[in-house]
Amino acid sequence: MALFQCVLAAFVAAGVAVQPEAPVRRHREQVAGDCTDHSAFDGGGASWQGRCKTLDQCRDSCAQSNNCVAFNWWSKRGGCRHYSNTGYTKRTTAHTTIGGAPACHYDKAGPTDCDACSSNCQQETEAPAPEYPEDCDDTKYFMGTPYHQTEIRGTSDFADMVKKCKSQYMDAGGFGGWSQRYSNGNGWCARFTREPTQQEWDSAGKSACAAYPGASGHCGAVCGTKFNDGVAPSCFGQSRFDNFDWANNNTCAKQPCTVYKTSDPYHAYCLKMACANTQRDAWCAAGGNSACRNQCGKCSDSQKACLQ
């Protein structure tokens, strides 16, 4: 040890930089841990990065960014989402959803859909375990979005119900929908008649499906919406104008008063609808100009920030 210290002192005296080596790197890797593989994140300043990305591309671009603390990645079509802060919540997904800090570890091939991502698709070396479609969330059930429905009969299990619902009815609507199955093999398949709102997505009923392929019971799934599979960041968007419900909605429990640091619920409502709303222009034109004339067309960039 004394000889090593003398040699080290000689290097320092000669002006040679002494760099820390492997022990520091190994410690960082151990702290990083493994990525999660069935947890999707909501909130946290989500930013959609596009599709057809490999896991390394999604994770590494997060690591190289000064504004990314975590990511989600979906293997089928290579969907990638970044998060700018750790204020996100987690929900369990039936399909594979890779996520975590940019230093986390996980190896998985993708995107595997060569029709959607022909330039860089990767095939699984082993057949993946069967699971519900990637754009279905079996933790959610009925939603308040307007819908039409049809009955589907004679299914073998919930996986069969979802497959038939999507292919025979739901996917033709373009806005997604929900599926439900009873113990007799029959069930209902619904398709939404318009795009769901963030509030409707957040207030969806809870499903309690058994493991794939799903026994009957209180089991359902919401599929094909813009909130499934990271298709779009979960920013608030509504083009339809509804008169403000003063009796029920004029409270800070219903409006984002904390976000805008105001004690006036109606002021927070106007900032939400006329500014943070991704469809603010359509909402203002539909009637919001008179309801929130001090906000429509007068929002700052910070007021237009994504509201989740």
Image: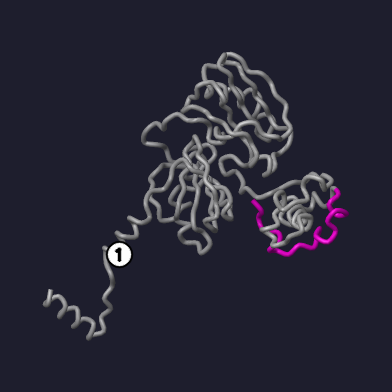
Residue 81 lies left or right of residue 105; in this view the side is right
Residue 26 lies left or right of residue 291; in this view the side is left
Quadrant, the N terminus: bottom left
Q: Which residue is tagged 1?
A: 24
Residue 302 painted magenta: yes
Q: Which residues are magenta?
A: 287-308
Q: Please name the residue shown 61% across and 15% down the image.
A: 153
Q: Position of residue 126 (x, y in %)?
A: 37, 33
- Considering every residue shown, the one lying at the far bottom of the view is 13
The kind of residue tagged 1 is: Val
Q: Please name the residue shown 14% across and 75% down the image.
A: 4
As rendered, which of 25 and 231 lies closer to the eye?
25
Q: Position of residue 64 (x, y in %)?
A: 47, 61
> What crowding class fits label 1: few (fewer than 14 Cα within 10 Å), some (14-19), or many (20 or more)?
few
Q: Please name the residue shown 19% across and 82% down the image.
A: 9
Residue 29 lies left or right of residue 7; in this view the side is right
214 shown above or below 24 = above
Q: Please name the residue shown 45% across and 48% down the image.
A: 55
